[in-house]
Image (cartoon, grey):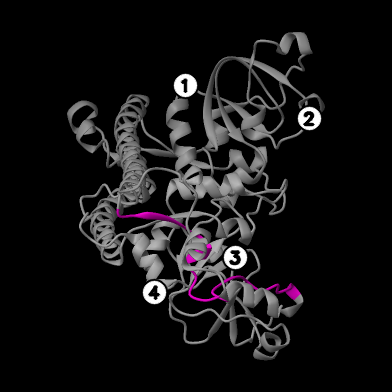
Amino acid sequence: MTRGKKEEKELTIEERLEQALVPVEEQPYELPPNWCWVKLAGLKASESGFFDGDWVLSENMDIDGDVRLLQLSDIGDGEFLDKSNKHISSNTFNLLNCTELFEGDIMISRMAEPIARSCIVPLFPYRVITAVDVAVIRCKKELILNTYLNYVCNSNWFTELAMHMARGTTRVRITRSNLGKMPVPLPSLAEQQRIVDRIESLFAKLDEAKEKAQAVVDGFETRKAAILHKAFTGKLTRRWRIEYDASDDETWEIKLLGEITSNYDSKRIPLSQEERNGLTHLYDYYGASGIIDQVDRYIFEGRYLLIGEDGANLVIRSKPIAFIADGRFWVNNHAHVLKASGEVSLDYLCYYINSIDLTPYITGSAQPKMTQVKMNGIPIPVPTISEQVEIVCILDNLLDKEQQVKKSAVTVLDQIETMKKSILARALRGELGTNDPTEENAVELLKKVL
């Protein structure tokens, strides 16, 4: 041990420099002349300034503990997410010989995609540690800014390279040793600050645009619900009634679904494998995943309204509960199959069923189910057929426009993320127009620090 320390002290500046710099053949791309490539581990403030988190087991946890355990879930792409809520006691901290984290340290994920994403540890009013699958680097302040290094760690090429160096089958990880070999583009401290300032200025403008686009996306369901409410209370077609119908919404009747539809659940015809070939099947839509050959199959031809009979989607509306099937198809026993009477439109029914809260008609929690009896009892507001057609026409038009607006907002969000990645890539190549070629070469700065 003493000999190792002695040998390390006897290294010349040139040898230390060689250890810290990335060999030419391993450099990801060409840098401005006064920059250099440095290994991540060469940026640590001291010999103990680059370490893994602590091995803390579930039995070590204490909900009343005064030491916070930061986890992988807390590390976002460049930001601290504050998602975890695990603690240990001070006694456990001492028994496990844990390493305390401080404000300004950088936590880097060693697993869970994207590998090597990082965040800066904020100021806490209590002691904090982190988990073993997180590496922590405490930077040499006279060599690199933690804000600058944080941007480097969250750039595309850095995370892709880290993923390439990761190992494992079920749970892919990068070792701290390999993480320490990761290349970091190093300009002067002044240039680092200019880069950080420029990135933050550009990102602030993009975040403002992102907030507006996200509001459009988040408001889609609210706007859709408002449109549907107006449709089924007569407000959407009030002007149409005055102009074409001469009636009012008070003439609408409330009828039960079972009174205006015929249910074909009991009139299904089993299909052979040969008969099923080439037909549209709706098993995956309503049924839970499983072996299709173990489910009864039935053929239908024409236009029907299908309503989910059971499954989690009755409660968690990840997709519409009702939709119209048209043509020749087969379904399983996970959907109600309905034909409408002459006084109601299938399209109108479909919109209405998908707009209401079905909770009162669903039984069971572990296995949610909407029986035929319950479904038949759903009250439906029924205007004239001509008004139903008009309502469907207006809804098709309005909701299509809303969908297009949402789609455009989602595209904007994707473009913003792409632009951020592009800005980051250009910044770390010295292409944002901030670099001063007359400033001291980063290699000279590295020599002084070493």
Q: Distance of mark 1 from mark 4, alpha carbons?
A: 79 Å
Which of labels 3 and 1 is toward the front?
3
The kind of secondary structure element at disc 1 is loop
| Residue displayed at 70% across by 72% down | 55
Q: Compute the Cα span from label 3 to label 1.
A: 65 Å
Magenta segment: does it hold 213? no
> Does any portion of residue 314 appear in the rendered image?
no
Magenta stretch: give its range: 34-58
Q: Furthest-bottom residue in view?
A: 91
Q: Name the secondary structure under disc 4.
A: loop
Q: Which of marks 1 and 4 is nearer the N terminus?
A: 4
What is the spatial separation of the Cα atoms under label 4 and label 2, in whole angstroms?
A: 61 Å
Q: What numbered label is drawn on residue 291?
A: 2
- Find disc 4 in the rendering and name its residue: 141
Q: How many labels does the image show?
A: 4
- Mark 1 or 4, closer to the camera: 4
* Residue type at the position of mark 4: Lys
Query: Which residue has dot 3 on it?
Result: 134
Which residue bears the numbered disc 1?
342
Location of residue 372 by image quarter: top right
The CA span between labels 3 and 2 is 41 Å
Q: Under tag 2, what secondary structure?
A: loop
Which of 49 and 12 lies nearest the eye of the viewer?
A: 12
Residue that sits furthest to the right in the current view: 294
| Of callouts 2 and 1, the N-terminal one | 2
Image quadrant of residue 440?
A: bottom left
Distance of label 4 from label 3 (alpha carbons): 21 Å
